[in-house]
Amino acid sequence: MERSNKMEKFLIEVYHEKEEIECALAAKIFLSSGSHFLTNAEWGCNDDVHKAWMIVEVENKEEAKRIIPSSFKSKANIVQLNRFTWQEVNAILTKYHYEK
């Protein structure tokens, strides 16, 4: 089977419980994984937002999901990211007959 070389960008957001011990346990799992993505996660715990975020470039959403440790898969949200060009924006606005 031929593999596509096109990489997509995803935001992975992983929630954990708000207790301080839960922050430390979640960070320990991420840091001990050896995964470049997990060891470089950004955390919101110091601002009382108990989530970790990673932006990854992988082939598809399933590959992004495989990055998440199994104990956190049910607490994760994966969002495919995109950028708009002026041409895309104008095409959408034209489609809806928007003029301004």
Image: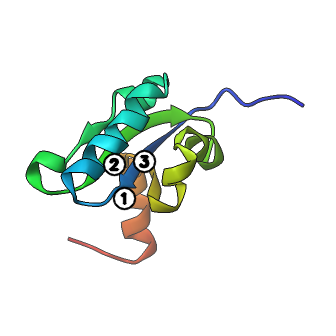
Of the numbered discs 3 and 1, the one sitting upstream in the chain is 3
Q: Looking at the image, is mark 3 or mark 1 nearer the viewer? A: 3
Q: Is residue 24 left or right of residue 38?
A: left
Q: Amino acid at mark 3?
A: Ile
Q: Is residue 3 left or right of residue 96?
A: right
Circle 2 is placed at which residue position? 86
Q: Residue at x 52, y 43 (%)?
A: 68
In percent of the image, x 22 and y 58: which residue is there? Answer: 19
Label 3 sits on a secondary structure element that is strand
Task: Look at the image and tell me in which quarter the N terminus lies.
Answer: top right
Mark 1 Cα shell of 10 Å, populated few (<14), some (14-19), many (≥20) = some
C-beta proximity under 8 Å, tags 2 and 1: yes
Q: Secondary structure at mark 1?
A: helix
Q: In this picture, is 41 found above or below 32?
A: below
Q: Tell me: 20 left or right of 27.
A: left
Check residue 90 in the rendering and tell me which mark sits there, or answer none: 1
* Residue on which the image places disc 3: 12
Binning the other alpha carbons within 10 Å of mark 3 as few (below 14), some (14 to 19) or many (20 upward) gives many
In the rendered image, residue 73, in percent from the top left (x then y), is placed at 53, 54
